[in-house]
Image (cartoon, rainbow, N blue to C red):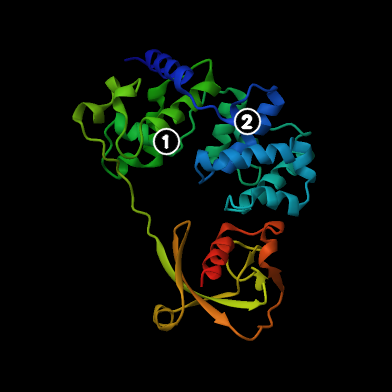
Amino acid sequence: MNNRNISNKILHWYDNNKRILPWRKNVSKKQKQYFTLVSEFMLQQTQVKTVIPYFINFIKKIPDLNNLSKVNDAKLMKCWEGLGYYSRARNLKKTARKIISNFGGVLPSNIDDLKTLPGIGEYTSKAIMAIGFNKPIVPLDGNVERILKRVFYLKKEIENSKNNLNKKISFFGTSQRSSDYAQAIMEIGALICKPVKPLCESCPISKSCLSYKKNDFEIFSKNKFNKIKYFEAEIYKDKDKYLLVKNDKFKFLRNLLIFPMREVEKKKFKSTQGKKINIKMSNMEMKIALNKKIKKTKIKNSFLLDESNINSFILPSFTKRIFKSVSKY
């Protein structure tokens, strides 16, 4: 099957099976570029189904690049609250301001300039070029990687290097509908060529896939080591108010509100009395002991937050999870 047949089959499948997503609306070219910028930042390390409601709300509250560059940080973070990886929101605003100051308010249309913007690296720059500017580029995300690994039956670590996968990407060829084509390939990876139990009978390119021919769909993956860390959280309650602190201690959730915490040794954690919870964050598994305090601790940048007023504050899901556990404790 040649490249043209592959692109035609993929686009035909996409036209009949694509998901209706808010950033795929038929809007002006300038608005599409803004939609692409915002959605690509949100989709970094976050699933599509999670991003959809956040994107809709974000665009409603911050409709364009100019508004994004001027939005106050409290409103920005409120729009991002619960989505995680909050540095993305801060970088998105910095990017908007830099586009206005350095590029006359117009999103750059080349990879080198895009990569000078905060939070935009190799993948995001290519995704913006393909989707926002209709350039003949196929960005290499996890979905595209998975298709290539199966099509070429790549089982060894050296075969699955980024460098080798980038060489294999020519398999897809190009299309004049570059924006649709890039999204179509990623869509097949997300909906058809799934990590477990791929739907090969519905795949438009299964005849070109070595894994399909060999009936072996296991994907090579390097196990990411999940660090296990132990913490003790101090839970001080005065009537219906809890003590929270602005986090300037840990790298995670920097400058956001958390319960006072400290990292402890495994031995110390095991000997701690009271309720214990597990929270996964990125590549870290956090084991947290909830330690009730009778006396209020003097901590810089701390204050009491009324339990009934949680939704009025910008709180990460991490803190809300502890709130939920504490309320049942």
Q: Find residue 62 and report its horizontal and vertical position in percent.
A: 74, 40
Give left or right: position of 275 versus 38.
left
Q: Find residue 5 and report its horizontal and vertical position in percent.
A: 38, 13
Q: Nearer the viewer, mark 1 or mark 2?
A: 1
* Residue assigned mark 2: 110
Q: Find residue 164 and report its horizontal and vertical position in percent.
A: 36, 36
Image quarter of residue 313: bottom right
- Amino acid type of disc 1? Asn
Q: Please tell me whether residue 192 is drawn above or below residue 274 in the rendered image.
A: above
Q: Please tell me whether residue 167 is drawn above or below residue 281 in the rendered image.
A: above
Image quarter of residue 69: top right
The structure residue drawn at horizontal position 33% and vertical position 21%, both measured from the top left corner, is 205
Q: Please tell me whether residue 292 is drawn above or below residue 318 in the rendered image.
A: below
Q: In 3D space, how far apart are the residues under numbered discs 1 and 2 (Cα atoms)?
A: 24 Å
* Residue assigned mark 1: 143
The structure residue drawn at horizontal position 58% and vertical position 43%, both measured from the top left corner, is 42
Give left or right: position of 255 versus 144.
right
- Label 1 vs 2, first from the N-terminus: 2
Asked if one can make out residue 208 in the rendered structure from this viewpoint, the answer is yes
**Dot 1: within a 10 Å radius of its alpha carbon, few (fewer than 14), some, or many (20 or more) residues?**
many
Q: Find residue 97 and report its horizontal and vertical position in percent.
A: 76, 43
What SS does tag 1 mark?
helix
Residue farthest to the left, as pictured = 214
What SS does tag 2 mark?
loop
Q: Are marks 1 and 2 in contact (CB under 8 Å)?
A: no
Specify the quadrant that holds the N terminus. top left
